[in-house]
Amino acid sequence: MAKVKPEDFKVEDFYFFKIKKMWAFFWSEHPAFWAICGFLFFEYFRPQAIYTAIDFIPWSQLFLALSLGFSFVDKKSKLRWSLTHTLIVLFTIQIYISFIFAYNPDVSWSKNIQFLQWVVVFFLVTTIVQTRERFYVFLMILFICSLKISIGTSRTYAMRGFSFTKWGLMGPSGYFQNSGELSIQMLVLVALGICLIMRMWPYSGRLEKLLLVLGVVTPVLTIIGASSRGSQLALALLLAVFFYKKVFRPKVLVAAILVVVAINYVLPEEQKDRFRSMGDDTTSTQRILYWKNGWEMMKDYPFTGVGFFNFPVYFTDFYPQDILFRNHQGRLRAELPHNIFIQVGTDAGFPALLWFILLPLSVLRFRGKSEIDHSIHRGLLMGILGFCVAGQFVSVAYYPFMWVSVSMLAALRTTHKISKSQPALESNTVEDAQGRNI
């Protein structure tokens, strides 16, 4: 029997979730691709948190190191420079300049890995994931791992009778453990899920259609159950952006009304009260003080900020009168600013904030001819939009949400630049009753 090669597969063979073909393709690929997929799996699925017996080494860092090593002997792995790469380098330089002028450099160096790892991830993803087949399998790993989280957390929400709790919902240990961060990952998933369900439905069997539906319904339930007001506002904005052109069609309008009624029914009364008190409660007041004084810090140190992750120590020393909460030891201690733009600006100044804003804008355009890839591109971009909106209320600038999405968007653009042909399947476009492509 002839050995299976990656060239034996085309990306359309995988639509939407043909697990056997993707599995065969995966094992036919180079170890560099195995390793970068391993990183994504261990970072998002977190098997080491489920099976604690294997939690004895830093798996994610190990797979990153393997990815780097194997990429040098993988013929398909090649660094293709783009504007996004330049912006990443400029942002990195600015971050490390802030280390030099930081209010407390020791704090900055102690948090170094929280930023540096995403620079490494970006360069490895854009170097290794350079074919459409590799990209799609990599995307499906992200989708399924996120779906696993959303199914588990939405089930928890349903099992407690859709009731309200102060802590919301807890995700797996790691980046998505707290309810606010969990909700943002669900925004990334629901944005991608909506785009996939709109484009992939005709190519899917029953089980695949179930996965598509779960990829939209379960993250929405998790966002509601997590009680994060910022993410719930971001979800409303995403839905409005997705469907604003179709909302006045009779069927869509009826469906929208039913969805609003259902959400209003499921949303606990305590959560509605939190929206009514938004801006007046102590938590909101504290965040406004963080933002106001954070802006003053940025104006005082426009070129370097107060230092990477130095906001809490600087705020505690210079604005103690504006700290409304005490820590577990009963001491007045500021937290991070609860806003991604204030976080970056106070970390490393206005130059860093400029590069940070330009990063997602650099992958805004996509010139590929594949309608499916255009939908994927839109889904990833909408996930970043959700992150930016929800990020106005939490300090998650160096969490994976934007960095992984930007890495994948940059990789998607590269796959089309080096692709020599378009899949024949794209000509079989499904149309709605008005003759429009869906």
Image (cartoon, grey):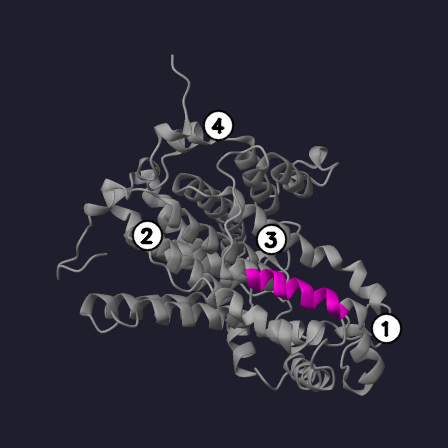
Quadrant location, the C terminus: bottom left
Question: At label 4, which amino acid type do we have?
Answer: Trp
- At x 31%, y 68%, the residue is 243
| Tag 1–tag 3 contact (CB < 8 Å) | no
In the displayed structure, 21 sits above or below 146; it is above
| Tag 3–tag 4 contact (CB < 8 Å) | no
Q: Secondary structure at mark 2?
A: helix
Between residue 197 and residue 285, name the one nearer to us.
197
Which residue does the numbered mark 4 point to in the structure image?
A: 27
Alpha carbons under labels 4 and 2: distance apart:
27 Å
Quadrant location, the N terminus: top left
Question: At label 1, which amino acid type do we have?
Answer: Gly
In the displayed structure, 276 sits above or below 219; it is below
Q: Secondary structure at mark 1?
A: loop
Dot 3 or dot 4: first in sequence order is: 4
Which residue does the numbered mark 2 point to in the structure image?
A: 197
Which of discs 2 and 1 lies nearer the camera? The answer is: 2
The stretch in magenta equals 86-98
Dot 2 or dot 3: first in sequence order is: 3
Q: Secondary structure at mark 4?
A: helix
Which residue does the numbered mark 1 point to in the structure image?
A: 330
Question: At label 3, which amino acid type do we have?
Answer: Gly
174 part of magenta stretch: no
Instruction: Give the x, y percent position of residue 299.
Output: 69, 86
Instruction: Give the x, y percent position of residue 265.
Output: 41, 68
**367 sits to left or right of 269:** left
Which residue does the numbered mark 3 point to in the structure image?
A: 171
Between residue 257 and residue 219, name the one nearer to us.
219
> Magenta: predominant secondary structure element?
helix
Instruction: Give the x, y percent position of residue 404.
Output: 54, 54
Alpha carbons under labels 1 and 4: distance apart:
54 Å
